Amino acid sequence: MSKLVQGYEVVIGFETHAQLSTKSKIFSRASVAFGAEPNTQACAVDMALPGTLPVMNIGAVERAIEFGLAINAHIAERSIFARKNYFYPDLPKGYQISQFEIPVVQGGEVSFFLEEGQETVRKTVRLERAHLEEDAGKSLHEDFIGQSGIDLNRAGTPLLEIVTQPDMRSSDEAVAYAKELHKIVTWIGICDGNMQEGSFRCDANVSVRKPGGELGTRREIKNLNSFKFMQQAIDYEVRWQIDQIEDGHAIQQATVLFDPDTGETRAMRTKEDAADYRYFPDPDLPPLVIGRDWVERVRSEMAELPRVMAERFVKDYALPEYDATQLTQSKAVAAYFEAAAKACGQPKLASNWIMGEVSRRLNASEMAIEQAPVSPAQLAALIGRISDNTISNNAARQVFDHLWQPKLAELVIGDTLEEVTAGVLALNALKQIDAIIEAKGLKQMNDTGELEKIIDDVLAANPKNVEEFKAGNTKALNGLVGPIMKASKGKANPGQVNALLMKKLG
């Protein structure tokens, strides 16, 4: 969706709840494991029985610190827990323990690349805050007739709520931001990112306005649990709001849900403001104090961040920024690239193959790169044979096709290899690549004398093309290159063919 839709500017902000990867809840020792029988993982604290008091989970705090460091945010030395008052049947206390005036993570930003027409543009979304809070329980309606069940297993699960500024201007930007945020929290290991299980839940605040006008009234689309539905929901909501305004209706602030079956959003309730929640400091929890030494210790124990790794790829491997960002979408992809690049000494070619052939095949087979049949060593050996002109790019794709098959030893090259054990080739990567090239007859023709004879024969058989080329019709050269490549059975080096042709044609 473009920035302007029917003459309106789209304005989007996000609130994301990332379930933290602790083993126990934020204020109790109850387990947070997913899938247990209802109400088997809720202790007295989670059920708000009289006399119980919350005790802070230090693991949740450290994960909040890690996130703050990952997005270049300020980690508050002193933050406050508050009571957010509202009534839901699955909220035992009648309030949620959260943070309001002083959150633990303040500011920060998330950057990503986005395709806009023919250009690849870098976008940055500013974050307002990220604060710690507890999750509510879950109301169950489907399994009961005329009544609802309450499952408190989820009550007290630690969450980090991540809130952006209203910086996004299209559903494409919103989805790209959500994907980048998902990458960050899973990379640093503070959240498993499982959207189907509710570990990473996104709420989109959507409004429209005339360009340069004041911000419009927003409607919040709750609990978007897939990137596909996220884009569909935002696009529908934008069109709905514009239609309402064009028909003379005012937009009412509301919380809405997206129905994937109809592709529509529908209002669930009017949207509360901060005053409606009657926030006040929780008297049962002291201020959360985080010393600089604690922050630095967490920093020293963190793995290399994706943005830092991307910067290193640009510096050490001379990659474009776009390539470096794409290759750091996951630790596994980054490790695959580094292994291949170091082995072949051609980092840009390795990047091209991974973002091209490897990614295309992984996507088609819904396979993770850890499951790829072609190892980094094999890819490196293949790239090496392209670089030394042993094979052409087209022949390399044929070799790659062959390598991607699950039972390589049973294919046509089997008879040419000396060591095969249980269907797995027992040769090193380079010997394996060379064996495939030899067996399939893909070696590029580098004999200048043989190639010159083919070119001479083609020139003699196509005098019209020769005359047209000499008369200034450069396209006539294509009518010569094709027959030459055909006569060489595709083994001629295209660069060498062009060079010799130009020499002979003067």
Image: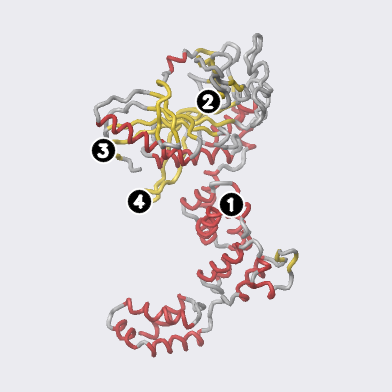
Q: x%, y% of residue 187?
A: 58, 41
Q: Earlier in the sequence, mark 4 or mark 3?
A: 3
Q: Earlier in the sequence, mark 2 or mark 4?
A: 4
At x 45%, y 75%, the residue is: 495
Secondary structure category for the residue under label 2: strand
Q: Which residue is mark 1?
A: 367
Secondary structure category for the residue under label 4: loop
Name the quadrant containing residue 128: top left
Q: Earlier in the sequence, mark 3 or mark 1?
A: 3
Q: Earlier in the sequence, mark 1 or mark 4?
A: 4
Q: Amino acid at mark 3?
A: Gly
Please rate how many residues cluster around mark 3, counting C-alpha atoms within 10 Å: few if below 14, some from 14 to 19, many from 20. few
Please tell me whether residue 415 is drawn above or below residue 209 in the rendered image: below
Secondary structure category for the residue under label 3: loop
Please tell me whether residue 39 is drawn above or below residue 109 in the rendered image: above
Mark 3 and mark 1: span between their CA atoms? 42 Å
Outermost residue to the front:
145
